[in-house]
Image: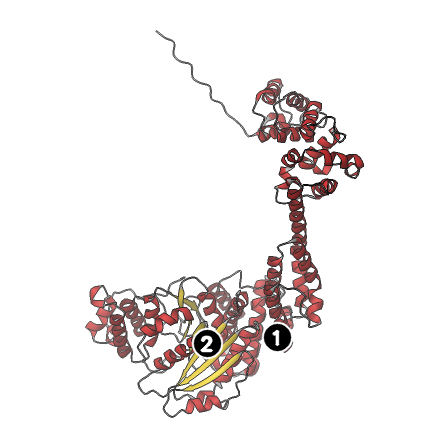
């Protein structure tokens, strides 16, 4: 009977950091094991480095002697041993022999070998006096360049060079200068030094960022977004040591250059373009009304004495400014204006909204926009109003502040673009001459130019064509528009008269978009003549259009981050049913397909416009379906509409049943036959006989809710 096999003992290997040799808890058996490893283990650099990290005496001395007695150490391991144990005589001799194959060479030197090893692995210990000696220069010239390159590879190939390593490498290359032919060690060393200098200057450039931006802010009313983007372009352009040095010098003198009204002396197009934005911010600051600094100081802390976070402080300052304007201008709660009158038609209110929006983009380097999405910002504004217990008619201050948040994000998006914006905007008109007068009305064209001008002012290289299309047969709207002085350096206003009794807005919009595409505009939009949709927010659309594959952007009134159109209960059941039916028929997943604030890239319109035929009020969905049919994505952004909902009041009546029949025809024309797939809402409306009847009919169908994100 054989004896049972003995179980194989389990070995547990601990990280070297937990070795008892490192904290003097070792015994003789531990030391013997380490010496055995030094004597017989594979002498790769990682093993040698680990063994040399054991510094406890006498273990460290025994390990060093064991390593020194080996004759099979590769070059890197030799250098490690020599750098950490300069008393390892055999290793130093071996390293000298590798560096100087001709032992009789006058430059062959143990000290040079030891110095090169120290330069790579312990650069702080290099003797600077020796580097400056004739003896060092003679050894540097005589050393084998191939072996020297292999020995110095860790610092030649590394990302950066520390100060002593940089000094030593420079001394070595200077000592070897003039040798022909130039060896790879010389080329690699020069590259490493260039990389080190570049890193150092870039580090200084990055360290200078905050100070330079603050210096520039002294000339821009505290606004910093343009300066931050300029500085980012400056650092991105500094690709060589010379460029980095030039950029650093420019950063140090930027505030003086701005104060003198000069252009920076640099040839980098991206930096020069961003500088135009900085000068535009300085010009805009001069035109700003006063009041912000006082509001900013007053908003330093809460009523209870707690300090506001600086990103929240900007919102509080804006809240106070806009609320004070409402109180002082419309003190009577019996006759409050509508939001569009207060924050668009009224020049003072509009200017204040722009003032707040400018500071929300970045005031003294603080902005809430990068830290919070608009849904959270809107919630903060409502919470602030609730805590303040402000009794302000029609919540006008909330409309203004939320519109300012949207305008701020819109301008920030335009500033962040890498290429200038080139806009074409269509505004359809029919019997709307009354909206264009300043007496007892909106002065709508003047307001739209002011809104768009504020947005474009941040980017002097931006341009917009504003095309007003009058479909009325009497041409009254066109004549009223032409009578308005619409001169603006960045906006070209064109008024076209195109009488068409068969069109209901759709014909004017589609014709105008076709004209602007033909004129070469790259980004197209349309909106209504009334002031519900502020053109300051068009940058939100532009940012969404910059995403890959997007062919249309809807400025939605129905997203969680939208504001100002419907009461808290949301749209009427009829409106919801219409939207669901549109989704059924055209497969458009959109919360607000009828919104009169949309934007498109010209590339999408070139293929979609020929597929669009509906000129009725339902033209929006026809165009969106054509864009989707061409393979593009339809996106949405939440907007702040300057609209005051009044219970029981109806805006311009819409014949939803007629519009829905038009959508049905659109579906057939776009190859989306509803009889070949499920269309439950469309079927329900047809069975009820009308949208109103279907909405009134009791049902257990879950109503569509606005998505929380897209």
Q: Residue at x 50, y 74 (%)?
A: 536
Kind of element beneath mark 1:
helix
Residue 592 seen in the current view = no
Q: Return the residue at label 1.
A: 284
Q: Is residue 352 above or below residue 384?
A: below
As measured in the structure, the alpha-carbon distance from the residue carrying label 1 to the one carrying label 2 is 24 Å
Mark earlier in primary sequence (1, 2): 1
How far from the left and from the top, in percent, is residue 98?
66, 28
67 left or right of 532? right
Nearer the camera: disc 1 or disc 2: 2
Question: Quadrant of the rendered structure where residue 564 is?
Answer: bottom left
Task: Give above or below for 500 relative to 545.
Answer: below
Number of marks present in the image shown: 2
SS type, badge 2 = strand
In this figure, which residue is indicated by the disc labeled 2? 424
> Dot 2: few (<14), some (14–19), or many (≥20) neighbours within 10 Å?
many
Extreme residue toward the top, this view: 1
Rendered position, 438 above or below 701 = below
Where does the image place residue 292, in percent across and percent down from the top left?
62, 73
Task: Name above or below for residue 348 compared with residue 36.
Answer: below
Image quarter in which the C terminus is found: bottom left
Q: Position of residue 167 (x, y in %)?
A: 73, 43
**Name of the residue lying farthest toward the front:** 180
| Image coloring type | secondary structure
Residue at image position (53%, 88%) is: 485
From the viewer's side, name the closer residue of 373 and 632.
632
């Amino acid at each position: 009977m054989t004896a049972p096999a003995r179980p194989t003992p389990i070995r547990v290997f601990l990280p070297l950091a937990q070795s008892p040799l490192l904290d003097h808890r070792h015994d003789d058996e531990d030391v013997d094991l380490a010496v055995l490893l030094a004597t017989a283990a594979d002498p790769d650099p990682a093993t040698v480095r680990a063994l040399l990290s054991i510094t406890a005496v006498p273990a460290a001395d025994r390990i060093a002697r064991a390593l020194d007695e080996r004759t099979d150490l590769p070059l890197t391991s030799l250098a490690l041993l020599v750098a950490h144990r300069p008393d390892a005589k055999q290793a130093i001799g071996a390293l000298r022999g590798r560096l100087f194959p001709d032992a009789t060479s006058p430059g062959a030197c143990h000290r040079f070998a030891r110095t090169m090893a120290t330069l790579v692995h312990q650069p702080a210990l290099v003797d600077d006096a020796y580097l400056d000696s004739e003896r060092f220069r003679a050894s540097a010239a005589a050393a084998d360049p191939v072996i020297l390159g292999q020995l110095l590879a860790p610092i030649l190939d590394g990302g950066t060079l520390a100060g002593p390593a940089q000094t030593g490498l420079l001394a070595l290359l200077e000592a070897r200068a003039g040798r022909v032919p130039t060896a790879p060690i010389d080329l690699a060393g020069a590259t490493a030094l260039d990389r080190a200098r570049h890193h150092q200057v870039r580090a200084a450039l990055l360290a200078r960022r905050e100070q330079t931006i603050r210096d520039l802010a002294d000339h821009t009313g505290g606004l910093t977004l343009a300066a931050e983007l300029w500085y980012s372009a400056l650092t991105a352009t500094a690709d060589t040591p010379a460029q980095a040095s030039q950029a650093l010098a420019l950063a140090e003198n930027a505030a003086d250059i701005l104060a003198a009204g000069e252009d920076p002396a640099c040839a980098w197009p991206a930096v020069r373009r961003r500088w135009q934005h900085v000068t535009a911010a300085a010009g805009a600051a001069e035109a700003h009304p006063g009041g912000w600094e006082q509001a900013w100081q007053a908003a330093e802390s809460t009523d209870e004495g707690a300090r506001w976070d600086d990103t929240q402080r900007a919102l509080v300052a804006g809240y106070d400014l806009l609320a004070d304007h409402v109180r002082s201008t419309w003190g009577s709660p019996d006759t409050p204006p509508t939001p569009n009158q207060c924050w668009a038609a009224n020049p003072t209110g509009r200017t204040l909204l722009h003032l707040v929006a400018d500071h929300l983009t970045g005031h003294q380097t603080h902005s809430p926009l990068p830290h919070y999405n608009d849904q959270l910002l809107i919630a903060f504004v409502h919470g602030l109003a609730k805590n303040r217990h402000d009794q302000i008619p029609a919540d006008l201050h909330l409309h203004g502040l939320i519109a300012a948040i949207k305008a701020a994000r819109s301008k920030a998006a335009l500033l962040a673009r890498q290429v200038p914006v080139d806009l074409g905007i269509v505004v359809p008109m029919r019997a709307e001459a009354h909206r264009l007068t300043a007496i007892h009305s909106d002065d709508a064209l003047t307001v739209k130019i002011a809104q768009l001008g504020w947005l474009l002012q941040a980017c002097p290289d931006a341009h917009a064509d504003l095309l007003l299309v009058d479909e009325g047969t009497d041409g009254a709207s066109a004549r009223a528009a032409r009578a308005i002085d619409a001169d603006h350096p960045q906006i070209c206003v064109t008024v076209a008269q195109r009488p068409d009794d068969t069109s209901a807005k759709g014909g004017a919009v589609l014709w105008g978009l076709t004209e602007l595409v033909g004129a070469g505009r790259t980004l197209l939009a349309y909106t209504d003549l009334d002031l519900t949709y502020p053109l300051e927010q068009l940058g939100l659309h532009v940012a969404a259009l910059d995403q890959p594959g997007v062919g249309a952007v809807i400025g939605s009134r129905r997203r969680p981050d939208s504001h100002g159109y419907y009461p808290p209960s949301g749209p009427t059941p009829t409106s919801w049913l219409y939207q669901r039916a549109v989704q059924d028929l055209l497969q458009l997943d959109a919360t607000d397909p009828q919104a009169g604030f949309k934007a498109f890239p010209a590339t999408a319109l070139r293929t979609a416009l020929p597929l669009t035929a509906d000129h009725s009020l339902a033209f929006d969905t026809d165009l969106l379906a054509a864009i989707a049919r061409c393979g593009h994505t339809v996106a949405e952004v939440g907007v702040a509409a300057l609209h005051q909902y009044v219970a029981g009041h109806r805006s311009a009546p819409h014949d939803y049943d007629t519009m829905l029949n038009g959508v049905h025809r659109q579906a057939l024309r776009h190859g989306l036959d509803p009889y070949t797939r499920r269309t439950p809402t469309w079927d329900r409306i047809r069975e009820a006989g009308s949208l109103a009847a279907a909405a009134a009919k009791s049902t257990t169908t879950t109503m569509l809710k606005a998505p929380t994100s897209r």
